[in-house]
Amino acid sequence: MFTTIPLDDAVSIINMTHKNPAAVLGMHKVKIFDKEAIAVRTCIPDAKDVFVVDLENQKNIYHMQRVHHSGLFEALIFNRKERFKYKFKMLDYFNNEHYINDVYSFWTEKLTEFDRYLFNRAQHYKIYDKMGAHIMEVDGVKGVHFAVWAPNAQNISVVGNFNNWDGRRHRMIKDENSGIWTLFIPDLCEGDLYKYEIKGYHGNIFLKADPYAFYSELRPANASIVWDINKYKWNDAEWLHQRYYTNHYEKPISIYEVHLPSWQRTLKNEFLNYRYLAHKLVEYVKQHGFTHIELLPILEHPLDASWGYQVTGYFAPTSRLGTPEDFMYFVDYCHQNGIGVLLDWVPAHFPKDGHGLINFDGTALYEHADPRQGEHLDWGTKIFNFGRNEVKNFLISSALFWIDKYHIDGLRVDAVASMLYLDYSKPDGAWVPNCYGGRENLEAIEFLKHLNSIAYQNYHGIMMIAEESTAWPGVSKPTWAGGLGFGFKWNMGWMNDTLTYISKEPIYRKYHHSNMTFSMLYAFTENFILPFSHDEVVHGKCSMINKMPGDYWQKFANLRALYTYFFGHPGKKLLFMGSEFGMFDEWTDSKSIDWHLLDYEYHRNLLKCVSDLNRIYKSEPSLYQNDHNGNGFEWINCNDSDNSIFSFIRKAKKFEEQTIFVVNFTPVPRYDYTLGVYFNTPYKEIFNSDSNIYSGSNIGNGGIIYPKDYKSFGKPFSISVTVPPLAGIILKPQF
């Protein structure tokens, strides 16, 4: 049987090892015995017979000969010297006719040489516009362009519901310099399912989801879905304009942390849609005074119980709650109602699920090959190789993607400590030191600086937040000042010390007084957010209300006092869902939070207490303007350990705009308690957590307190107040 296909090319096509199938398949000019001809070749394994149909003159139909039983066909056309547009007419073994566009007859420069150059240098910050699956039109034919990075693969094919998941049909073309494989497949459309069939470095064949997919099947299915994410019409221009000019350091930020799949569900315990949740959640958040919603990761993930922290789809919102447009609507609706949206994002590690990033091209591509560098044993996950430019580009573009395409207002970067230290949660001998013999992960540090500098450079007014639990210096300092470049850092030390203190019986708290005062030694070394987060109400740690000692009344009184102290302490605020109304059970991802508790007075009134604290927090500049410098805080008395009382002043930029906090962590009321104050003017009690409207004992100061003309605690004047039991009060001078 005569064929113009070189033997080596034919073998590599049949064995699926050819890096550039377009050099063999498709239409080519050839010479046969000094005669010019056109050769058209294709590989259609399930074809009984194939014909080339001339689209310029459909009377011209050329029969193709089968040159190999695997489905390799070739037509030699001697009466044509120039290439022409064509289709294949294929007869299957049931004699059904199918007209097929040849993928190798289309040429597109979707991914330019410059794109590849920037990607290989970790500087293509919108690589998501090029990689993955993109609907486009080539030569008047609509289809989908695919691009994936897998430098060590022997072959990659796009498989899906459009080709019976047959990897012999749509083989991609490799660019050897960049390691990127591309292919335009005509006649595909939004909603088509696909994966990459990869013949790995060692010859094994496996399926992978698209790392850059915009949408995925609902678990346990895991195919990627072709989707156009550019068709949603946004209505939040005013919000984005205001965000651009916002200085968050001098603004009130009270964050409601939410796990969307379990915030609310149907009566049958089914997931709700992003659009429905937008209306219900925004109404709730506005009613109770929060300024931002922070979402536990909604990036696609296979395991519900990971809460989204083991990600397989770094560019796809989870399909559990709807489509990409549904999530865009969620963010848009929040913005139209003045609510910011923050998103947890996880660059520290990824899961070992077979369809994900692990051993992506048959080698450790996104991760380290050495398990001492490449695995978090605690979590059973792989660690990204931050020293590889293409991996850094993947992650940086993922972060920017959510800000760009979904208008997210900031990212809370998870598990930063695990990225900074090579020996994080590893015993001696189970980690590899850096090139200087140290424990610092130099590549991860450079990555974080790169990420933060580009994020703030490109998107003014966003928030980059680090969940970092160690004393690493300068986490929230700019990179030009030697910091990591985050805007904010979770104050995990304050959280741990505070919860350790409050969990003690009141009689013992005086022995742990320093737990509450220690935070002021470092409160202004970083731009802190104070978190009472999801991590504190799971895994046997008890819910916030059940951390409180005492009987039913004392538990609620303790928690109200704690929240008063929380809103008075310098730093932005974060509270996890359910904690605002005293959920008794630990949080679980498998059902809604316990909304039925709001049928009971104590829970309703705790929620009212939090709502009022949010209202005061937002209305008093002293509580937020100087959050991140020492001018905003002054102790009145931090040494009253015997009474377990803490008193301090919060100050705004204008000195006369002050508020005084007095918090009593014992069940004993204190009468005629002396405080030093700056002004010889009446002070008004603007909040009392012991008020009967919060189910308290209603001990207080009757509204107005008058100063006395003698010095106290270094202040020129004094006031005597009643401090209710297990409660906090807020006072404000009246001019």
Image: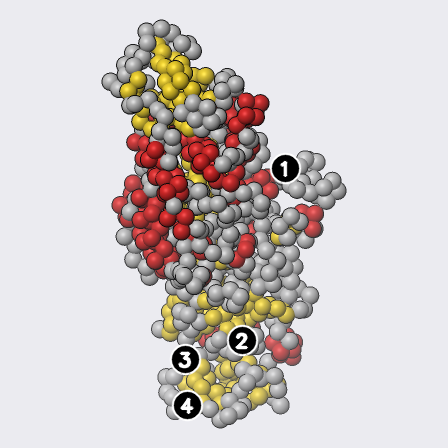
Q: CA distance from mark 3 to mark 2?
A: 27 Å
Q: Secondary structure at mark 3?
A: loop
Q: CA distance from mark 1 to mark 3?
A: 58 Å
Q: Nearer the viewer, mark 3 or mark 2?
A: 2
Q: Position of residue 207 (x, y in %)?
A: 58, 68
Q: Amino acid at mark 4?
A: Asn
Q: Position of residue 651 (x, y in %)?
A: 36, 22
Q: Amino acid at mark 3?
A: Lys
Tell me: residue 701, above or below residue 382.
Answer: above
Compared across the picture, whether 482 is left or right of 650 comes to: right
Q: What residue does disc 1 label?
A: 440
* Of pointers 4 and 3, the one earlier in the residue sequence: 4
Which residue corresponds to the image point at 48% horizontal and 51% vertical from the top-left? 297
Which residue corresponds to the image point at 45% horizontal and 86% vertical from the top-left? 98
* Of pointers 2 and 1, the one earlier in the residue sequence: 2
Report crowding for label 3: few under 14, some 14 to 19, many 20 or more residues within 10 A (C-alpha): some
Circles 3 and 2, Cβ within 8 Å, touching? The answer is no
Q: Nearer the viewer, mark 1 or mark 4?
A: 1
Q: Which mark is residue 165?
A: 2
* Of pointers 2 and 4, the one earlier in the residue sequence: 4
Q: Amino acid at mark 1?
A: Glu
Q: Which mark is residue 60?
A: 4
Q: Position of residue 257 (x, y in %)?
A: 43, 45
* Of pointers 1 and 4, the one earlier in the residue sequence: 4
Q: CA distance from mark 1 to mark 4?
A: 68 Å
